[in-house]
Image (cartoon, grey):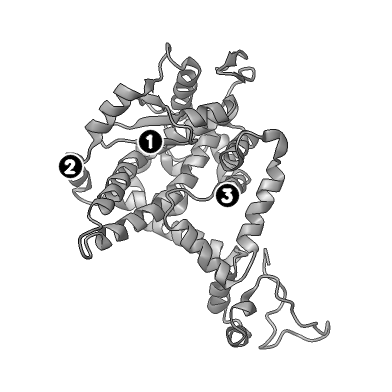
Amino acid sequence: MSDGHQHNGHESVPGRQRRRFPGISSRAYEHPADRSALVALRKLSGFDTVFKTLSGLLPERSLRLLFLSDSVRVSDRQFAHLNDMLRDACYILDLEKVPPMYVNQDPTPNAMCIGMDEPIIVVTTGLVELLDEEEMRAVIGHEVGHALSGHAVYRTVLLFLTSLAVRVAWIPLGNVAIMAIVTALREWFRKSELSADRAGLLVGQDLQASMRGLMKIAGGNHLHEMNVDAFLEQADEYEAGGDLRDSVLKILNVLPRSHPFAAVRAAELKKWAATRDHQRIMDGHYPRRDEDKDASVRDSWRESASNYAGEVRNSKDPLMKLVSDIAGGAGDLGDRVRRGFGGFTSSAPRPPKDPGTAPGPADDGPPRDGA
């Protein structure tokens, strides 16, 4: 627990009691798309054997030796305040074995959880210097959430395949298949980041601190110049703004990234914090680890599909609205196509309606939620 002292130039807040979640399963906080993929992988016959075999090909031992020799290992004698936060995060999420954590000299704010056999956590000096204690607590909880979910294995594979794709780029079609796998893994990993953000909130139990941390990662250590509410408004504008061209550009911009954009993550986390699912966890009602073996792949896929359908239905993005319109048989779709991309702008004016006239084929009725 925090004692209110100064650590590395950051003033810590007085210690406070945080709720603990004994035996919590990662399914409790995982994003539906992340969870369905993991449940399916865990159910595959021979999956563990395949990955253990693959681990012999991955440079994991080299990575461990590299961090051991050229970074600072967190302990009660080095970065003791980070060590306290790490142990606290593992206690809250009931992770029995505390993973090793290293501080690596790098001005870029970053953190990761990697490893095939046992996860290790790495945070950069840029991140340590950027965040205050409560923000850092959420980040460490985020990484412990990755460890609890088993994400470190797939993250390590993603790093290896990304490196391999660069090495074989000179071979004709040599990296096409690899990049297809990398693209799929990145899509999954972006969803896993939303899961880990939720784990960070369960550990820190301070929504404002979690969102401040994301805002600082986007805009630097100028908290007096920034505002969380304005930052969240950016996320709303990003989702709703523009036309189909912007929707396509959003997809192209995010494809090479392993993480979602910071403003989008903040908005997603705030949305989840307001849900009944989050409140039930805080009240002590959540899936237990000893029930994981009974988890249904079909139920997880159904929940994932339902989640995506809800995202499409409620999205303000022009492309998602088009998909929703097609699914709903919107009568004005043909006219919008004839008018080109401009016909799909989120701010396109609608013709005035006669209050006494019922919606007809060319009238899509009252605006949908979020329109």
Q: Residue at x 68, y 42 (%)?
A: 228
Residue 340 higher or lower than 5, as above or below? below
Decide which of 301, 263 is in the foreground and name it: 263
Q: Residue at x 52, y 38 (%)?
A: 285
Q: Which mark is residue 113?
A: 1
* Label 1 Cα neighbours within 10 Å, binned few <14 / some 14-19 / many ≥20: many
Q: Quadrant of the N terminus?
A: top right
* Label 2 Cα neighbours within 10 Å, binned few <14 / some 14-19 / many ≥20: few
Residue 24 higher or lower than 364, as above or below? above
Q: Give residue 231's position: percent from left, percent from top.
A: 67, 47
Q: Give residue 112's position: percent from left, percent from top.
A: 41, 36
User: Could you tell me if residue 289 is visible in this image?
Assistant: yes
Decide which of 144, 241 is in the foreground and name it: 241
Q: Residue at x 75, y 85 (%)?
A: 358
Circles 3 and 2, Cβ within 8 Å, touching? The answer is no
Q: Give residue 39's position: percent from left, percent from top.
A: 34, 49
Among the 4 quarters of the image, the one containing residue 154: top left
The residue wearing badge 2 is 57
Q: How far is disc 1 from disc 3 in space, using C-alphas? A: 21 Å
Q: Amino acid at mark 2?
A: Leu
Q: Amino acid at mark 3?
A: Glu
Q: Which mark is residue 268?
A: 3
Q: Quadrant of the C terminus?
A: bottom right
Q: How far is disc 3 from disc 2 in space, using C-alphas? A: 36 Å
Q: Give residue 132's position: percent from left, percent from top.
A: 59, 26
